[in-house]
Amino acid sequence: MPSRRDVLQSGFGLAIASAVPAKLFADSSNVPLKQLAAHSGIAMGAQSMRSLLLQDPNLSSFIAQNFSVLTPGIE
C-alpha cells in the first residue's frame, strides 16, 4: 500500500498538498486524508482507471480509506 509520503511526493500529491493546510499533516500519521480535509471543509478526491483498481487491491484500499470522491480515468 502506498504511504501518505509516497502519495504526497508523487505528481498526484501536488493537488493534495495545495488543498490541505500542512499543519493538518503534522500530528496525524494514521488519520485518513479525507478526515483531515473535512476539518477544513474540503472533499478529498482521487482519479484512477477502473483497470488499475481491479488489478491492485492495495491501491483500491488506499483510495477508499483516504478519499471521499473518485473520478474515473480515461480508459
Image (cartoon, rainbow, N blue to C red):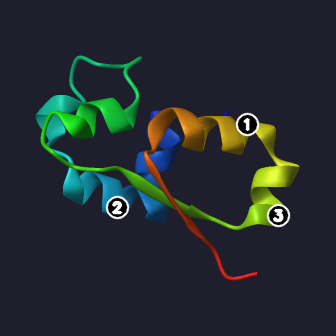
Q: Which SS class for mark 2?
A: helix
Mark 2 = which residue?
14
Q: Residue at x 31, y 30 (%)?
A: 35
Q: Residue furthest right?
A: 55
Q: CA distance from mark 3 to mark 2?
A: 23 Å
Q: Residue at x 35, y 50 (%)?
A: 44
Q: Residues within 10 Å of mark 1 (few under 14, many from 20)?
A: few
Instruction: Say what amino acid the circle numbered 3 marks.
Output: Ser
On the image, the x and y values in percent for residue 23 come to: 12, 32
Looking at the figure, which quarter contains the N terminus? top right
- Residues at discs 3 and 1 in contact (Cβ within 8 Å): no
Viewer-nearest of discs 3 and 1: 3
Q: Residue at x 37, y 21 (%)?
A: 31
Quarter assignment of residue 30: top left
Q: Residues within 10 Å of mark 3 (few under 14, many from 20)?
A: few
Instruction: Say what amino acid the circle numbered 2 marks.
Output: Leu
On the image, the x and y values in percent for residue 40 come to: 12, 41
Drawn side of residue 20 relative to residue 50, left or right: left
Mark 3 = which residue?
51
Q: CA distance from mark 2 to mark 1?
A: 21 Å
Drawn side of residue 69 relative to residue 51, left or right: left
Mark 1 = which residue?
58
